[in-house]
């Protein structure tokens, strides 16, 4: 691929969306061509799947159904906009990718990290981010942020018990140890300006390293 595939991960209320908007602006100002997108979603089909997955009324959704829907949305999103953007030499900044499925469905839903990874390999055919920024925030603090944000629409995951969000957090810690060369931890409990600065430094360093 000619471009750079960078994902941003974290639990609920980690501040990913705010920081990604800022990173998109900063990188564009430097002359980079950047695609900012999200999962599940980013395109029409995947946004419709997102609505099914996250709708608060769908509390009866079975965990393997959930995992498969995420993988389906990921596949369509990948082939429709991510891969073409990478072929064009763009930086793709993606709000969530496969690690979300590994933490949420693989670990927190107890399907199994390796099992969910296998499902997603069928969907992504080996296309992985070369850099993943993990925004680390304690679940309780992240959910408090959400509660204070009146503009954020509540989704099905927000309704989960604290035990679930703690399991997601544990899952991400496992992934940090499992993929230390790809995943970089950022303290998301800092002020948003500092989180943005830390993330920007990691991205610029990565771009320089890959181009050597």
Image (spheres, rainbow, N blue to C red):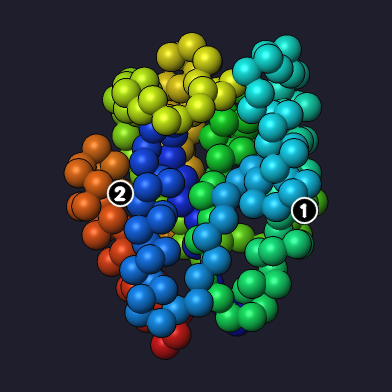
Q: Position of residue 188 (x, y in %)?
A: 29, 42
Q: Residue at x 34, y 68 (%)?
A: 26
Q: Residue at x 73, y 29 (%)?
A: 52
In the shown orientation, is residue 65 left or right of residue 35? right
Q: Position of residue 181 (x, y in %)?
A: 43, 60
Q: Residue at x 46, y 22 (%)?
A: 165
Identify the mark at residue 49; answer none if there is no mark. Answer: none
Q: Is residue 70 visible?
A: no
Dot 2 and dot 1 residues touching (CB under 8 Å): no
The image quadrant of residue 99 is top right
**Circle 1 residue:** 76
Q: Is residue 168 visible?
A: yes
**Circle 2 residue:** 186
Q: Position of residue 106 (x, y in %)?
A: 62, 32
Q: Quadrant of the C terminus?
A: bottom left
Q: Quadrant of the N terminus?
A: bottom right
Between circles 2 and 1, the one closer to the viewer is 1
Per the image, label 1 sits on a secondary structure element best described as helix
Residue farthest along the front direction in this orientation: 151
Characterize the local packing of mark 2: few (<14), some (14-19) or many (20 or more) Cα atoms within 10 angstroms: some
Q: Residue at x 43, y 40 (%)?
A: 10
- State which tag comes first along the sequence, 2 or 1: 1
Compare residues 114 and 75 and report the one nearer the observer: 75
Does 20 appear above or below 205? above
Characterize the local packing of mark 1: few (<14), some (14-19) or many (20 or more) Cα atoms within 10 angstroms: many
Q: Position of residue 183 (x, y in %)?
A: 43, 54
């Amino acid at each position: 691929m000619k471009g750079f595939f960078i994902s941003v991960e974290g639990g609920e209320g980690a501040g990913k969306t705010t920081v990604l908007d800022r990173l998109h602006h900063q990188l564009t100002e430097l002359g980079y061509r950047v695609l900012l997108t999200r999962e599940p979603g980013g395109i029409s089909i995947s946004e419709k799947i997102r609505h099914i997955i996250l709708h608060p009324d769908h509390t009866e959704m079975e965990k393997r159904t959930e995992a498969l829907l995420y993988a389906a949305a990921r596949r369509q999103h990948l082939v429709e906009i991510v891969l073409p953007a990478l072929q064009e030499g763009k930086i793709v900044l993606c709000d969530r990718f496969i690690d979300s499925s590994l933490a949420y469905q693989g670990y927190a839903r107890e399907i199994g990290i390796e099992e969910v990874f296998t499902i997603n390999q069928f969907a992504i055919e080996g296309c992985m981010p070369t850099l993943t920024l993990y925004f680390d925030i304690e679940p309780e603090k992240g959910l408090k942020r959400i509660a204070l944000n009146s503009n954020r629409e509540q989704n099905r995951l927000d309704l989960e018990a604290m035990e679930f969000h703690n399991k997601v957090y544990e899952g991400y810690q496992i992934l940090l140890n499992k993929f230390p060369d790809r995943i970089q931890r950022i303290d998301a409990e800092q002020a948003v300006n500092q989180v943005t600065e830390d993330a920007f430094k990691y991205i610029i360093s990565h771009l320089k390293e890959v181009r050597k």
